Image (cartoon, helix red, strand yellow):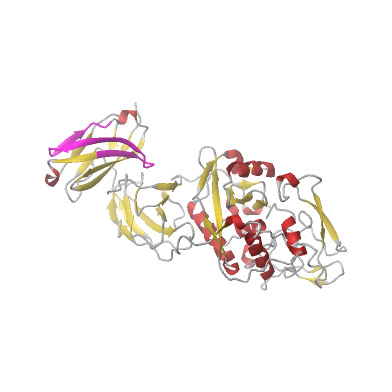
């Protein structure tokens, strides 16, 4: 069977979106507060011992938000990098995440940029998928890089995503019962010159274990942890191998990943905070690990409280090879309308991110598409220019394979008539007035055959189909384009001789 259109799953606008999104430095590191009742109970009873080294596969449901008009969604490459980074950060814990039901694309401006946690609660409870960690990627998650709602999901800001950013791992740690090591200090500034208190109160409105437990008053008390560890099981995060930390703001670390400022505990013992922990607020380049006890807590959470997130087997194998481009390569000339890309299938890959750019750095992309096929028909490119293009394979379980080596092609000048292909087949005009017929020039080898003529829009939807008898060297196809919106369309002609492709731009009705 001949597949005659590409299944495109995710397309970015070919023009950049200039609406301002908050920068990372303008957002608080995390909005999450509190210690879960499950963790308090876990620390008060004999812990769940997980002696296996088996990988725990955790279902993840991403929701990628955009404005009402579909603009502003996180770039596909950035999301893939974030997913790769999440699994790399959790590798030492033998916890790995997989995407359960694909990428859920939501268009809702009020959720894409929300200023309050209750708006985020509404977003999550409206869209959550059961039996998975739901993760929402938005432009502004209530003024934070991210937050976790124990009964709903995690929200992540676009500017706090991507390679070498550990915000998603931090929030996933919260979802698996880990508090901040400085719990109680959120919103407070540590001052070495004044005595350190023995306990702190903090507001954890909206961050109770369930919506029903948000009454009575949302205040809790946290003991301040001593350096000697005497109260480590009852103070701060209740975890003893994460040492005291009172810094609740982004801070730069020294060469040993420790805080540059000295702190002292309520007994006056001096120390430095550990910036290597993902659950700290140290800069991303300082962070590299969950502690062994943090790992034990997360695995115990998954084996008990969140066992419904687990799947017993890995369904897809790693994607480790680079894709290899087939065409266009080595400055091959392609039409600016309907350029055709193809590449070799990569073992275990189910999806491909395809990019084309005028720049070798791919800093601006005119093609930025996720597809499940190994070919792609692009829309409108600029004529008479050189382009670079590349492919990145992935699946719902593994997203760390690199891009292919970039290949180059050139677009031909845009004209009303296309040049014949190697078989002598062509169609024109490629710039089609609404309602005007399309002329097909048929090579001798195709004469006398029946063909099915189909037209698809730029999104791959079939909009017209008819049978044609190829009984002359030149055929006029009366295409009902007067009823179609202006845009790019693809005509596919399929007969026993094979398939031919023709791209055309339908102009606006005058």
Is residue 457 one of those drawn in magenta? yes
Which quarter of the figure is the C terminus placed in? top left
Q: Is residue 441 above or below residue 483?
A: below
Q: What is the magenta segment's predominant secondary structure?
A: strand
Q: Is residue 6 above or below residue 277?
A: above
Read off the magenta span: 453-479
Residue 79 appears at what percent x and percent y?
A: 52, 54
Q: How many marks?
A: 0
Residue 149 appears at what percent x and percent y?
A: 67, 50
Residue 416 shows in this picture: no
Quarter of the image where one finds residue 359: bottom left
Residue 71 shows in this picture: yes
Residue 38 appears at what percent x and percent y?
A: 72, 57
Q: Nearer the viewer, residue 47 or 434?
A: 47
Residue 437 appears at what percent x and percent y?
A: 24, 32
Q: Is residue 459 above or below residue 50?
A: above
Is residue 244 one of those drawn in magenta? no
Quarter of the image where one finds residue 379: top left
């Amino acid at each position: 069977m001949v597949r005659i259109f590409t299944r495109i799953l995710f397309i970015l606008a070919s023009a950049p979106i200039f609406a301002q999104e908050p920068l990372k430095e303008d957002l608080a590191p995390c909005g999450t507060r509190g210690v879960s009742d499950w963790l308090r109970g876990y620390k008060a009873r004999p812990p769940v011992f997980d002696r296996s080294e088996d990988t725990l596969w955790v279902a993840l449901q991403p929701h990628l938000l955009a404005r009402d008009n579909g603009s502003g969604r996180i770039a596909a490459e950035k999301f893939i990098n974030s997913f790769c980074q999440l699994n790399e950060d959790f590798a030492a814990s033998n916890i790995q995440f997989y995407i359960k039901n694909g990428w859920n694309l939501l268009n809702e401006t009020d959720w894409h940029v929300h200023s309050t946690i209750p708006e985020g609660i509404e977003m999550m409870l409206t869209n959550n998928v059961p039996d998975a960690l739901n993760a929402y990627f938005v432009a502004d998650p209530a003024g934070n890089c991210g937050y976790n709602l124990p009964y709903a999901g995690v929200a992540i800001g676009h500017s706090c995503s991507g390679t070498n950013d550990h915000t998603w791992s931090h929030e996933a740690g919260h979802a698996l019962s880990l508090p901040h090591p400085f719990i109680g200090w959120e919103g407070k500034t540590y001052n070495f010159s004044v005595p350190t208190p023995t306990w702190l109160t903090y507001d954890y409105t909206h961050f109770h274990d369930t919506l029903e437990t948000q009454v009575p008053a949302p205040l809790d008390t946290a003991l301040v942890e001593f350096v000697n560890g005497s109260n480590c099981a009852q103070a701060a995060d209740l975890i003893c191998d994460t040492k005291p930390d009172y810094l609740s703001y982004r801070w730069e670390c020294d060469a040993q990943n420790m805080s540059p400022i000295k702190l002292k505990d309520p007994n006056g013992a001096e120390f430095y905070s550990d910036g290597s922990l993902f659950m700290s607020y140290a800069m991303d380049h300082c962070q590299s690990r969950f502690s062994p006890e943090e790992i034990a807590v997360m695995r115990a959470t998954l084996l008990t409280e969140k066992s419904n997130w687990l799947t017993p087997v890995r369904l897809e194998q790693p994607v480790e090879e680079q894709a290899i481009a087939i065409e266009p390569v080595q400055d091959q000339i392609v039409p600016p309308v309907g350029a055709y890309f193809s590449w070799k299938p990569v073992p275990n890959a189910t999806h491909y991110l395809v990019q084309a750019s005028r720049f070798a750095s791919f800093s601006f992309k005119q093609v930025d598409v996720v597809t499940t096929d190994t070919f792609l028909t692009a829309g409108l490119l600029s004529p008479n220019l050189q382009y670079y293009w590349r492919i990145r394979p992935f699946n719902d379980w593994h997203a760390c394979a690199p891009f292919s080596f970039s290949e180059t092609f050139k677009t031909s000048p845009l004209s009303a008539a296309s040049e014949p292909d190697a078989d002598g087949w062509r169609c024109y005009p490629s710039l089609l007035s609404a309602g005007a017929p399309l002329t097909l020039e048929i090579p001798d080898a195709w004469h006398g055959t029946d063909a099915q003529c189909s037209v698809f829009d730029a999104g791959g939807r079939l909009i017209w189909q008819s049978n044609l008898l190829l009984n002359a060297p030149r055929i006029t196809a009366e295409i009902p384009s007067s009823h179609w919106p202006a845009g790019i369309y693809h005509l596919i002609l399929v007969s026993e001789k094979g398939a031919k492709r023709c791209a055309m731009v339908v102009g606006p009705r005058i």
